[in-house]
């Protein structure tokens, strides 16, 4: 037996799918940001091996800023995921 969805259910289904897609994109952006963070950390480690003064301080500052940005991206992705999952649960009721 084929199940027919109402127009309202279809609309909610599409909105929920869009929210899940947005959450996935944000998670992907956060993953890319983490990759860049790891690359910057590797640069900082190499700089630390080669120098003990100003260059290391600047890299540490840049790395900290990048880490903070990365945390914000992850938090945003999780919030978007939570909203999408909440919407999915509401529609499923």
Image (spheres, helix red, strand yellow):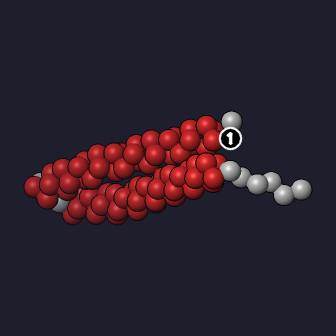
Pick the quarter of the image with the C terminus: top right
The residue that appears at 26% across and 58% down in the rendered structure is 44
Quarter of the image for residue 75 reads top left
Question: What crowding class fits label 1: few (fewer than 14 Cα within 10 Å), some (14-19), or many (20 or more)?
Answer: few
Q: Is residue 15 visible?
A: yes
The residue that appears at 80% across and 54% down in the rendered structure is 3
Q: Is residue 17 visible?
A: no
Residue 51 coordinates in the image, percent (x, y):
17, 60
Pick the quarter of the image with the N terminus: bottom right
The residue that appears at 23% across and 62% down in the rendered structure is 47
Residue 18 coordinates in the image, percent (x, y):
51, 56
Quarter of the image for residue 29 reads bottom left
Q: Which residue is mark 1?
A: 92
Residue at far left of view: 54
Q: Across the whole image, how many numbered discs are drawn on residues? A: 1
Q: Secondary structure at mark 1?
A: helix
Residue 29 located left or right of residue 85: left
Residue 29 located left or right of residue 5: left
Residue 10 coordinates in the image, percent (x, y):
63, 54
Residue 87 located left or right of residue 52: right
Measured along the vertical axis of the image, is residue 16 above or below residue 29?
above
87 or 26: nearer the eye?
A: 87
The residue that appears at 64% across and 48% down in the rendered structure is 9
Residue at far front of view: 7
Residue 47 located left or right of residue 19: left
62 or 45: nearer the eye?
A: 62
Residue 84 coordinates in the image, percent (x, y):
53, 45
């Amino acid at each position: 037996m084929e199940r027919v969805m109402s127009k309202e259910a279809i609309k909610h289904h599409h909105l929920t799918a869009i929210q899940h897609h947005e959450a996935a994109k944000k998670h992907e952006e956060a993953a890319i940001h983490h990759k860049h963070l790891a690359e910057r950390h590797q640069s900082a480690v190499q700089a630390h091996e080669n120098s003990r003064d100003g260059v290391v301080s600047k890299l540490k500052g840049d790395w900290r800023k990048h880490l903070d940005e990365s945390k914000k991206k992850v938090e945003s992705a999780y919030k978007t995921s939570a909203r999408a999952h909440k919407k999915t649960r509401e529609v499923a009721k």
